[in-house]
Image: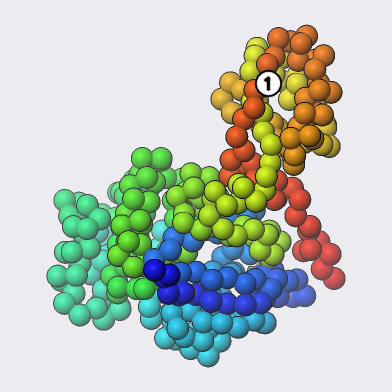
């Protein structure tokens, strides 16, 4: 069964001082989706997310979020949105329970005490309820922040780089929790720079210089990009020499160390073969071997980033 569309917008555009920072973006997000926004710093991810949920009015474009008009019904949308910003916005010198209780009061959450208890239990924070928020590690702070923005039972959750600087295990727990919430019908828009997080999203949008360059599931984006890849193995000194040589080759899209191997990708298998054939002598000299590899999301995003046209630079 097709899931209902929760966000449906067309032509979203935002300009600041003559610069178009979001440029005619179209998006459809189904209910219960975890939708990831990727793109370089300053590419317009946060601005797009804020326009989608009524926090910012677009200069052009139209559409609905949660069935409400993003231009005229922003107030109704905001009531049903939970927003977790990049900075920890809770009170460090209040306990976990006091923080949640305070937020619940601000939102006038009914059955406040029961809801706060439930939130502490759900996030595995109950045992730490009396601990000061300022004494939590990064991963626990993120969990507390997530608990806080869910207290008023939003339909849509906006997460702006929610786990920056958090260790992989805490990140995994955080994401497992997001998936459980999504199964329950919550829709999540999340911006991230982490490839492992991108891979955990149901759908992705890649934005560069305000333009939506690619959209789809991780597997679809990898297939659409149709990059050809190879892994080169051998002595590290040889790989370093080869890496420097291949980075000068305009036929290649990326050359990067993956552990003890060099990962090379190109727009087509012909381009990859040509580049490796050109380096054959160097590879033989250093005892290096190339085997076919698989392009991944990181290759696709690096490729999109390098191919993007800097329309910001062209602004008057
Ligand atoms: N209120 C504002 N006034 C002027 N320029 C702004 C304003 N808000 C954002 N911008 C500019 O718009 C562009 C897009 O910013 P945005 O925060 O949406 O990018 P982002 O992709 O979320 O970046 P990051 O990954 O660094 O968080 C940037 O160049 C930024 O400087």
Please provide percent x and percent y for residue 48.
59, 69
Instruction: Give the answer, above or below, for where 151 lies relative to 65.
Output: above
Please provide percent x and percent y for residue 129.
19, 56
- In the image, 144 versus 217, the foreground residue is 217
Instruction: Give the answer, above or below, for where 3 lies relative to 165.
Output: below
Number of marks in the rendered image? 1
Q: Quadrant of the C terminus?
A: bottom right
Applied colour scheme: rainbow
From the viewer's perspective, tell me whether residue 44 is left or right of residue 201: right
Residue lying at the far bottom of the rendered structure? 72
Whether residue 68 appears in this view of the structure is: yes
Please provide percent x and percent y for residue 253.
74, 39
Residue topped by disc 1: 290
Whether residue 86 appears in this view of the structure is: no
From the viewer's perspective, tell me whether residue 220 is left or right of residue 199: right
At x 74%, y 75%, the residue is 17
**Residue 315 position by quadrant:** bottom right
Instruction: Give the answer, above or below, for where 129 lies relative to 247.
Output: below
At x 67%, y 82%, the residue is 60
């Amino acid at each position: 069964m097709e899931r209902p569309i929760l966000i449906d917008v067309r032509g979203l555009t935002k300009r600041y001082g003559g610069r178009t920072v979001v440029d005619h973006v179209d998006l459809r997000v189904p209910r219960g989706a975890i939708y990831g926004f990727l793109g370089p710093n300053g590419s317009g991810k946060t601005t797009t997310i804020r326009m989608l949920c009524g926090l910012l009015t677009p200069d052009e474009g139209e559409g609905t979020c949660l069935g409400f008009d993003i231009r005229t019904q922003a107030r109704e949308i905001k009531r049903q949105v939970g927003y977790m910003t990049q900075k920890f916005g809770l009170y460090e010198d209040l306990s976990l329970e006091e923080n949640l209780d305070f937020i619940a009061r601000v939102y006038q959450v009914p059955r406040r005490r029961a809801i706060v208890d439930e939130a502490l239990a759900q996030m595995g924070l109950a045992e730490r309820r009396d601990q000061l928020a300022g004494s939590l590690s990064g991963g626990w702070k993120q969990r507390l922040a997530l608990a806080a923005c869910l207290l008023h039972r939003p339909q849509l959750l906006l997460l702006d780089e929610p786990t920056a600087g958090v260790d992989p295990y805490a990140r995994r727990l955080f994401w497992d929790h997001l998936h459980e919430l999504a199964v329950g019908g919550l829709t999540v828009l999340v911006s991230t720079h982490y490839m492992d997080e991108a891979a955990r999203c149901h759908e992705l949008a890649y934005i560069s210089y305000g333009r939506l360059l690619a959209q789809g599931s991780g597997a679809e984006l990898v297939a659409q990009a149709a990059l050809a890849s190879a892994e080169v193995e051998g002595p590290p000194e040889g790989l370093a020499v080869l890496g420097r040589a291949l980075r000068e080759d305009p036929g290649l899209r990326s050359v990067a160390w993956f552990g003890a191997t060099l990962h090379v990708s190109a727009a087509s298998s012909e381009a990859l073969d040509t580049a490796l054939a050109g380096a054959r002598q160097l590879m033989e000299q250093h005892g290096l071997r190339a085997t076919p590899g698989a392009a991944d999301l990181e290759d696709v995003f690096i490729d999109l980033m390098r191919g993007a046209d800097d329309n910001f630079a062209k602004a008057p």
